[in-house]
Amino acid sequence: MEQSIKIKTEDLKPSLLEGLRKYFLAIDATEITISFSTPKKKSLRIETADQVTERVEKAVKNVEGGNVVSFTGDEFLQLSKLMSSIK
């Protein structure tokens, strides 16, 4: 017999694990497989060497031409929090 039990990470408590251990012993389980999943992360776009070079050269021209944005450390932290809350 094969069974699946899904548990969220925040629900993993010693009492739950002990209960599962007792359950597996009671049903005489001979094998237990544990698997996990993680949220999918956004993949980076794949660029050719020419595309990377073009993007870097454009950035250098922007900096040299004064086309830049500046902010304080506190402003950066605020922006970081804002950006991490946007999905």
Image (spheres, rainbow, N blue to C red):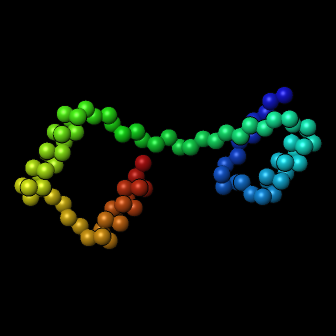
Is residue 43 placed above or below 61 in the rendered structure?
A: above
Residue at x 91%, y 38% (from the top left corner)? 27
Question: Residue 10 placed where, x, y %?
Answer: 66, 55
Question: Residue 82 placed where, x, y %?
Answer: 37, 59
Question: Residue 6 placed where, x, y %?
Answer: 71, 42
The answer to which image quadrant residue 81 occupies is bottom left
Quadrant containing the N terminus in the rendered view: top right
Residue at x 8%, y 55% (from the top left corner)? 64
Is residue 74 placed above or below 4 in the rendered structure?
A: below
Residue at x 70%, y 46% (from the top left corner)? 7
Question: Horizontally, is 1 left or right of 7 in the view?
Answer: right
Question: Residue 38 placed where, x, y %?
Answer: 56, 43
Q: Residue furthest top?
A: 1
The answer to which image quadrant residue 67 occupies is bottom left
Question: Horizontally, is 66 left or right of 72 in the view?
Answer: left
Question: 14 or 56, which is in the foreground?
Answer: 56
Question: Horizontally, is 86 left or right of 63 in the view?
Answer: right
Q: Residue furthest front?
A: 49
Residue at x 37%, y 56% (from the top left corner)? 83
Q: Residue furthest left?
A: 65
Question: Horizontally, is 26 left or right of 81 in the view?
Answer: right
- Counting labels gives 0
The answer to which image quadrant residue 71 occupies is bottom left
